[in-house]
Amino acid sequence: MAPASTLTTADKLREMLAARDFLGLKTLLPSLAAPDLAHLITNRPEAELLILFRLLPLPQATRVFEYLTPSAQNRLLSHLAPEQLTDILNHMAPDDRTGLFERLPPEFVRTQVERLGPEQRRVALELMGFPHDSVGRLMTPDYIALREDWSTEQVFDYIRQHGASAETVTMLYVIDDKGVLLDDIHIREFLVAPRTGHVRDFMDRRFVCLRAQQNQDDALADFRRHQRVALPVTDAHGVLLGIVTLDDIVALREREDTKEIQKLGGSEALDEPYLQIPLLKMVQKRAGWLVVLFLGEMFTATAMGFFEGEIEKAVVLALFVPLVISSGGNAGSQATSLIIRAMSLGEVSVSRWWQVMRRELLAGLALGVILGIVGTIRIAVWQGLHLRDYGPHWVPLALAVGFALVGIVLWGSLAGSMLPLILKKVGFDPATSSAPFVATLVDVTGLVIYFTVAYAFLHGTLL
């Protein structure tokens, strides 16, 4: 065994668990921050997770549970004693508890909600009553609300009494007698203010707020635009219902980015971490798109068959099919990835489709010319160095390949950039226009462009 001074926290935890040193664990665990402890234990066996949670004080157990991965939370849920689980759920942040309930079977959720205390049950039912993808599902009702006639001293007295249960005290919210939001004020305004000041002295009545029924994607854009640590949430009448904090937005952004990346790879979004999702379920998620792409590629063979006569007359044309087609697919994949990311960041919208088309028209043309020149030079160099004999008509062949590359890359760029916008316009997720999907589309249409250009240049000679 290594000397105690050289052991990491993870090593100490592992050794204490192996030795069943419960006294040592009760001393070690309270000294660890909840995020760090959650990271250390998230992949531990269920039996060890249960031991650790029984040794943790309730406040710390709740915080650690909130930081565990969804898979670790699920493993614990079915093994914790009903009383301990109820205690944890009662003490969880309302927004975190709502996120947990969203992933669980309805019958299980119904049972757990009934076991909550009256106030927490009311809050849980209120938050779960909002649409699934709405801001209302992200918010917490734990915030600091002020009145405009309060003095600075009253503000600090109120924070001392209620700040411990608030999600954040960085932003304070001013409401009227009916709960209507009047303003939001950063706490630093009060920290540097004289004690004789009043809340109304700091109010400018300019604030940013979210609507409870608002889509979560819009909330992401508002947080990015205004760079806030928290934003208030109101109903249609302006009544303050809760707040959404930056940590929830960061978690949402991570989930959305993960889904987009997985879809861009030509797969359905996984609902669980890669190593936790059952193999059969992962195969199901990936098989659908692979079948669709396979069927799409079958049209490539159909297109090749349509130009079978041209290939028989000039077999050399077949040599450049992979080169030309892959270039179009690569250009389309580039454009798709760039546009989807720009849309997720709010840089591009459907209404700006013409600007996107114009840019991709110029970019695709420039990229096509570059690749066309490279392709033409490649044929000329191979012919000149006698590395390959393309026959007496190698010059029109080289020009055909070069101009075909211009057309296919241009088409790939346009298709790759417009498809996400079209899907967004008709109400589909733009990320479903994955790079493999665009590449398949460009493969089929690119063959038509290639052989049409080749026929124009080689008609009367090879064709």
Image: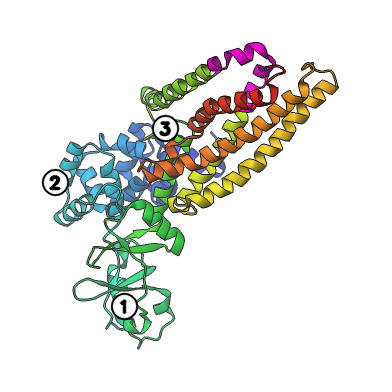
Give the quadrant of residue 408.
Answer: top right
Q: Amino acid at mark 1?
A: Val
Residue bearing the label numbered 2: 114
Crowding at dot 2, Cα within 10 Å, few <14 / some 14-19 / many 20+, comes out as few
User: Left or right: where does residue 371 sit relative to residue 161?
Assistant: right
Residue bearing the label numbered 3: 18
Residue 311, magenta (yes or no): yes
Crowding at dot 1, Cα within 10 Å, few <14 / some 14-19 / many 20+, comes out as many
Q: Is tag 1's residue or tag 2's residue first in the polypeptide sequence?
A: 2
Give the quadrant of residue 210.
Answer: bottom left
Q: Amino acid at mark 2?
A: Glu
| Residues rendered magenta in the picture | 304-325
User: Left or right: where does residue 31 sit relative to residue 401?
Assistant: left
- 157 in relation to 341, above or below: below
Q: Is tag 3's residue or tag 2's residue first in the polypeptide sequence?
A: 3
Residue 67 spot, x, y in % from top left = 38, 47
Q: Secondary structure at mark 2?
A: helix
Residue bearing the label numbered 1: 155
Real-space Cα separation, disc 1 to disc 2, in angstroms? 36 Å
